[in-house]
Amino acid sequence: MRVTVVGGGVIALLTAVEFTLDGHRVTVVDQGPIPYSRATSFDQHRIIRALHPDDPPATAAALRAHRRWLELEDLFATRFYERVGALTVLPPAAAEAGVLLLTGAGGRARTLTAAGLADRYPHLALDSGFDAVLEDDAGVLLAERVLAACAGWLRWQPDVSLIEHRPVVAVDGERGRVSLADGQVLDGDGVVVAVGPWARRLLPERIAKSLVLHRQSLLYCRVPAAAAEAWAATPAVPALGTRRGAWLIPPVAGTALKLTSAAVCHRTDDLTDHVTPEYRQRELAAEFGDLLPGFGPAWVLGSKDCYYLSYAETGGPLVVSLGGPAHAYAACGGSSFKFAPLIARTLADRVLGRVPDPTGLAALDAVPLDATP
């Protein structure tokens, strides 16, 4: 088959990899360079962890994604997965249940008591009434390195074409046709659209209206030299156990410490700039001032706002059928990076007319929403 993949982020590029491994001819097209630095997935790092409390299918799916990421490192001959573990801070009963859930799914995890947390991570001011789940098959994906590895591998494949700086203005799924802003038309036997927050421009209005745009603020920080050794032994922390939903990614492989929380994620109407408003920076600084002893303005290197789409009905991802052998990953739900290898395989199978293997993720396993008239 001749397949066109629209997008320059992790979902698009990994889907192109899956098509290529299956022996098909692939064209990847994006409005910017490939990989695209404005893609939702373009960042220093992302957390990959298995534990999804009270959600056994998602936990099992995350373990499968972990294994696939290791296989992709081998395929690309590039290291981008720092296996530093993941720490989820929870009430004691929930932490105990989390360990049972993970180990029952085949993962490795143990409980750390509040006293154990204080002893092991004195540079984190955690709630003294909470325990935590420390999981081993988890850590940090170096996101920019992942995208570069995907694009670099694709460039070496004889049946892959990368078309950069060419915006797509329309997709005809029934005919496998992708129209570019300069008038060029790409014809093929299948299409995948995975363009992140720009998806609304390429989908029918009734589908676009069901997608919610979110804006998330992030702080990037330098840890004090005196605490560098402690931070080097710190896992990714997808949940610090706070009411506002704070989480952090430690500095690994030369990256910065990244800080944010669910409280600074809000709905917005349009894609505009990526500049974090000063009041959002102050809000995050005040929040982490209570969580990181000694934290202050000298730690902060910079900030950034990023965007993502979610499906209004579920708050999560959405797969859409565009008619014929064409599908769109219309919304990522904000947490798709860790599951990207499973998403890519599912999208490729759907375009190729195969029944995808169940992933355990409802948004992937359900019948895609029909975007045709």
Image: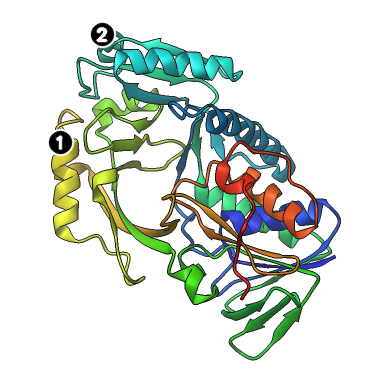
Using the image, determine if residue 301 lies above or below residue 124: below
Q: In this view, does 90 lie above or below 166?
A: above
Q: In this view, does 45 lie to the left or right of 119?
A: right
Task: Of the two numbered discs 2 and 1 on the same chain, state the one appearing first in sequence.
Answer: 2
Which amino acid, by three-letter code, is at mark 2? Ala
Q: Which amino acid does label 1 sit on?
A: Gly
Packing grade of label 2 (10 A; few <14, some 14-19, many >=20) is: few
- Closest to the observer, 28 or 99: 99
Real-space Cα distance between discs 2 and 1? 21 Å
Number of callouts in the render?
A: 2
Report helix, strand or loop for mark 2: helix
- Rendered-image quadrant of the N terminus: bottom right
When asked about the image quadrant of residue 241, the answer is top left
Residue corresponding to mark 2: 115
Task: Judge whether 167 appears above or below 346 on screen.
Answer: below
Mark 1, secondary structure of its residue: helix
Q: Position of residue 233 (x, y in %)?
A: 39, 22
As drawn, the label of residue 289 is: 1
Which one is nearer the viewer's eye here, 217 or 225? 217
